[in-house]
């Protein structure tokens, strides 16, 4: 399985099988997800002495997270899967974060920074949510026991989340270290292998990003109508209308 992780602040690529990882590469390239991902795929295949053509499935983190990062990863996964005729396994960034923190002896709550002062999170047994840090604090205040927050949203807004949770009468959550600040590609590969074994796959055409909200940039087809040229009023047919 080829695992592709680019939904948040990390770009990661791994090759894995039932016995575990064969090779992996992880980088935090800022906003250079697209420039980093494809060379990383080549490098990981080379390190594992495994040609891309031998990949039997592709696993990809579909978000939520950075819009560009998600698109880059999903597009790459679709391209490889279409080209090789292999199935796709999809995982959300929150699921991958929780998988990476499986050994933490606390209630793990993955939190992804969605920018614009919002975060995405998933408390155990509850659906994925998008909201403010105050909304997250209200969820945390209702949990039993102590929680550990993981992900880049926890790292960025940790102090505010802790203060708001305590103010609502909840137990102060712990904030993870930097090593759990992004969905790890090794965790993605483990989760992907299990889902592949269980038959939880889709085809490349049906693999879709999980954005949680519309993109900030949209094509605007109506605010700039085409100019109207009055051909009949032009006395000189050779004249240029501008």
Image (spheres, rainbow, N blue to C red):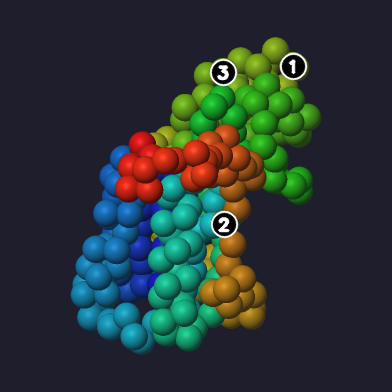
Q: Residues within 10 Å of mark 1 (few under 14, many from 20)?
A: some
For mark 1, what is the residue?
168
- The circle drawn on residue 46 is none
* Residue 31 higher or lower than 4, as above or below: above
- The circle drawn on residue 160 is 3
* Residue 217 higher or lower than 137, as above or below: below
> Judging from the image, what secondary structure is the residue with disc 3 in?
helix
Residue 219 appears in the picture as rendered: yes
Distance, label 1 to label 3, CA atoms, is 12 Å
> Judging from the image, what secondary structure is the residue with disc 1 in?
loop
Q: Quadrant of residue 39?
A: bottom left
* Image location (x, y in percent) of residue 214: 62, 42
Q: Disc 1 or disc 3, which is closer to the eye?
A: 3
* Residue 69 higher or lower than 136, as above or below: below
Which numbered disc, 2 or 1, marks the residue that appears first in the sequence?
Answer: 1
Residue at point 57%, 57% (across, down): 209
For mark 2, what is the residue?
209
């Amino acid at each position: 399985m080829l695992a592709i992780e680019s939904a948040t602040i990390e770009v990661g690529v791994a090759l894995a099988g039932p016995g575990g990882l064969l090779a992996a590469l992880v980088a935090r390239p800022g906003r250079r997800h697209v420039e980093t991902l494809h060379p990383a795929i080549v490098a990981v295949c080379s390190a594992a002495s495994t040609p891309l053509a031998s990949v039997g499935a592709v696993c990809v983190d579909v978000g939520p997270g950075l819009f560009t990062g998600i698109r880059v990863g999903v597009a790459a996964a679709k391209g490889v899967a279409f080209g090789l005729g292999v199935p796709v396994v999809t995982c959300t960034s929150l699921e991958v974060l929780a998988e990476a923190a499986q050994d933490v002896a606390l209630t793990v709550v993955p939190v992804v920074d969605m920018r614009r002062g919002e975060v995405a999170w998933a408390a155990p047994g509850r659906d994925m949510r998008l909201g403010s840090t105050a909304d997250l604090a209200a969820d945390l205040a209702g949990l039993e026991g102590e929680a550990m927050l993981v992900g880049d949203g926890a790292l960025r807004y940790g102090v505010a989340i802790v203060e708001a949770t305590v103010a609502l009468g909840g137990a102060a959550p712990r904030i993870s270290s930097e090593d759990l600040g992004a969905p790890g590609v090794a965790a993605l590969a483990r989760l992907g292998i299990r889902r592949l074994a269980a038959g939880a796959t889709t085809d490349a055409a049906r693999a879709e990003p999980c954005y949680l909200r519309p993109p900030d940039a949209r094509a605007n087809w109506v605010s700039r109508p085409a100019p109207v040229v009055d051909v009949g009023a032009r006395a000189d047919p050779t004249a240029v209308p501008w």
